[in-house]
Each structure stands twice: as structure tokens, then as C-alpha cells.
Amino acid sequence: MSWLFVLIPGMLAGLVQGLTGFGPAIVLMVFLPSILPMAKAAGVAGMIPVISVVMMAIHYRHYIKFKRIIWPFILYAVVASLSIHLGGLLNVHISRALLGGLLIILSLYFLFSKSGGQKEFPLYVAVIFVLISGFFSGLFGIGGPLMALYFLSLSNTKEEYMATVQMFFVLDMTYTSTFRVINGIIGANEIPIVLIGVVGAALGTIIASRILNHMNLALVSKCIYTFIGMSGIYYLTSSIVSMI
């Protein structure tokens, strides 16, 4: 395995994480399944961005809203734990296609709705977002898009959004990574891959921080919605091609 095949995706993942506040696993899961089984790829994708998330959480620590994190994280963690065990029982391609379709719809709605991303979601919508995010986090290590939308809807500034969503992902990645290690999904053989990816992710986050200083919440929001749509297109088309 070439170390560049992990370092470069890690750097791209860190760049995406630094600009939008989520999405490193989406980038990594384009590459990692070609060198690792799906369950291990999801686990490694959830561990590589940890350094990036911690760096950003520390940087924006004064803006973190802890009360917004508690109940979503508890529900998210429970669902993610269950879906990790369900991974071998579900059709991966159908699940990814459904996720792709959902992300495309959400992206179009928030990009073209004048008020869609400017108001807080009703509680039932927030719960649905958390359930779906936890489910796909357990399956593919991808729980970020809907959680990003949820925390974005509660935030008044770029700093507030970044701080809170990064703190949520610190808890998420710590919990799910520990869960996978305890259950033997991730072991010593995956450590070199994780370490190489971490270096790349850190470099990407440093680059992103320079760019983010020149962006406001509106521009960050458009980047988030656009990246969600691109992710949805990738998951939907790749799944359909795999099923043909």
C-alpha cells in the first residue's frame, strides 16, 4: 500500500473538515474501502479526523454550547452502537443509495430555500436527523451531514457553529472509535494507516484555517449545502453502478 494513497485523502479530509465542519469520513470512504473491508474502513475513517476535530474544538472552545450537544449525542451514540452490529446484515449498496438520495434532496432544499437554513428545526425533525446520522455513522462512519445541518440551524455565527459541531464530533469519534476497538473491528494492523492519515488531516486542517478566516456564516453555509449535495450524488451514483 502506498502511503500517499492514505496521506493525500487524509489531507483532503482535513481540508473539508476545516472548511465545512464535517465530512472527512465522506472523503476518506471514497478511498479506504479499496484497501480495507467496509467495517474496518468505516472505523479508520472515523479515527483519522480526530486530530483535526480536536484542533478546531480547541481553537473555537470559547463558543461551544454544551447544552446543545448532550441529548443529541446520547441518542446518536445508542443508534450508532446498534448499527455497527447491523452492518453485516444490511445491503450496503441500498443503504448508501438511500443516504445519497436524502442528501441530494436536503442540499437542493437548503440551497434554494430562502429561509430553510435560517430557522431552528422542530424537535421531531431534529430527532429524525440524529437517528439517521447515528445509523449511518455506525454503518459507514458517516454521520456528519445531518448533524451539521442541525447545529447550523441553531447557530448565529460561524464560530458558534464550528465550535459546537466540532465538540459533538470529538465525543462522537471518541465513543465510536473506542467501541470499534473494544469489539475488535479496529486492531494493531490498522494503526499505521490511521497515523499516516492523521498527518494528512492535520495538514489539511491547517490550510483550511487560513481560508476560513476570510469566510462568514453565509458562505460557510453554502459550502456545507453544496458539499452535502456532492456527497449525495456520489453515494447515489456509486451505489447504482455497484448494483447494476
Image: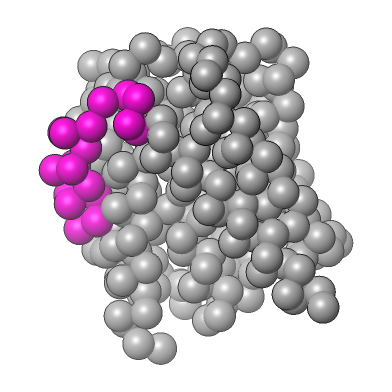
State which region is magenta.
Answer: 203-220
The residue that appears at 23% across and 16% down in the rendered structure is 62
- In this image, 244 relative to 237: left or right? right
Q: Position of residue 22 (x, y in %)?
A: 43, 42
Q: Position of residue 120 (x, y in %)?
A: 56, 11
Residue 88: image quadrant is bottom right
Relative to the observer, which residue lies in front, 86 or 201?
201
> Does 152 appear above or below 223?
above
> Does 238 appear above or below 42?
below
**From where the camera sits, is residue 181 visible?**
no
The residue that appears at 41% across and 34% down in the rendered structure is 222
**From where the camera sits, is residue 221 visible?**
yes
Colouring of the image: one colour
Residue 90: image quadrant is bottom right
> Does 94 appear above or below 18?
below
- In this image, 171 relative to 60: left or right? right
The residue that appears at 52% across and 68% down in the rendered structure is 30
